[in-house]
Amino acid sequence: MSTGKGKIGIIGSGLIGRSWSMLFAAAGYNVTLYDILPEQIETALVDLKDQLTKLEQKKLLRGTLTAKQQYSLITATTSLADCVKDAVYVQECVPENIELKKTVFKNLDAVVDAKCVLASSTSTFVPSLFSADLVHKSQVIVAHPVNPPYYVPLVEIVPAPWTTAEVTEFTRNIMEDIGQAPVTLTKEIEGFALNRIQYAILNESWNLVKDGILSVADIDKVMSAGLGMRYAFLGPLETAHLNAEGMENYCQRYSKTIYSTSMSFQPVPKMEGDVMKEVSRQLNEMTPLDQLPARRAWRDNCLTQLSQLKRDLDSK
């Protein structure tokens, strides 16, 4: 099956690569999935077919095409050149290892044309770290998804200093076209936006456990039954805006309290040693390691249902 929407190359057949493949296929793109090992490709294709079928059965499949039609848009190869040939966009999804990413992008640089966008799924490395020496470095950008990307739509778009404005715009447009929710950073910054905010929450959560203020379960409840309920629909800034008569009034009421509380925060923890063991112990009691796959499946189902609810509410 061919829809004429263009070809997408996916580098890496792991979980993230599979999610990207499903997202692009759902929007009608022809997807070529690349990996160096044939057996990994075979495993990925079997899993993709199974996931799409189950999503369709649960009426949770994205897009207007059937599971069979979407699966027919996905092919696989062990040839990098074949993967990127005629592709308008390539999404790299290899493990978070900077030397590996440098190698992958160097190899891509040798086979890609001057039009194809080269995006990385990295969550930790700014694009200048692996694109500085490339001939096609102006075509390189980060498109960082939130795990699992099929169920959580946010994508952080991060250009390198030499990434062209056209590449940034194209990346944002294609993310919107496949139903994701892109945000565009104006420049590189360590941790991007999502992880900087996430780390601030993790750091304070860690210190609250360290000081015996709250248990791990109760800290997670603060988010899941409190802040997270708001943040599923509103960000922290609009939440503040609505919690008073606008943001200016909120700052007049609470800025001194926010500042004084923030000044009491402890130094950033290293997340190691005895506290790490205690946090891990409590988490293992909550979700034993052998139950992680089932808990992830429960998480993905919850995220899918929430995503559907948000789409339904937005359409009204």
Image (cartoon, helix red, strand yellow):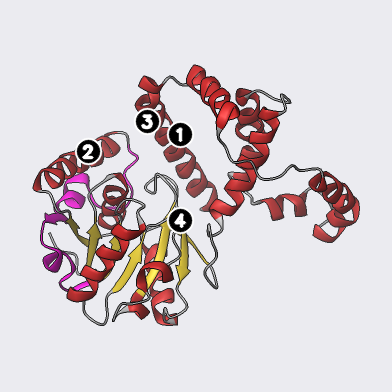
Q: Is residue 280 above or below residue 134?
A: above
- Earlier-in-chain disc, 3 versus 1: 3
Q: Residue at x 41, y 65 (%)?
A: 142
The label nearer to you, 4 versus 1, is 4
Q: Is residue 45 left or right of residue 8?
A: left
- Earlier-in-chain disc, 3 versus 2: 2
Crowd around label 2: few <14 · some 14–19 · many ≥20 (10 Å): some
Which quadrant would the N terminus be assigned to in this image?
A: bottom left
Q: Position of residue 150 (x, y in %)?
A: 37, 47
Element type where label 3 sits in the image = helix
Magenta residues? 59-88
Residue wearing tag 4: 124
Label at residue 302: 1
Determine the CA span between mark 3 and mark 4.
25 Å
Crowd around label 4: few <14 · some 14–19 · many ≥20 (10 Å): some
Residue wearing tag 2: 53
The label nearer to you, 3 versus 1, is 3
Quadrant in which residue 26 is drawn? bottom left
The amino acid pointed to by label 3 is Ala
The label nearer to you, 3 versus 4, is 4
The amino acid pointed to by label 4 is Thr
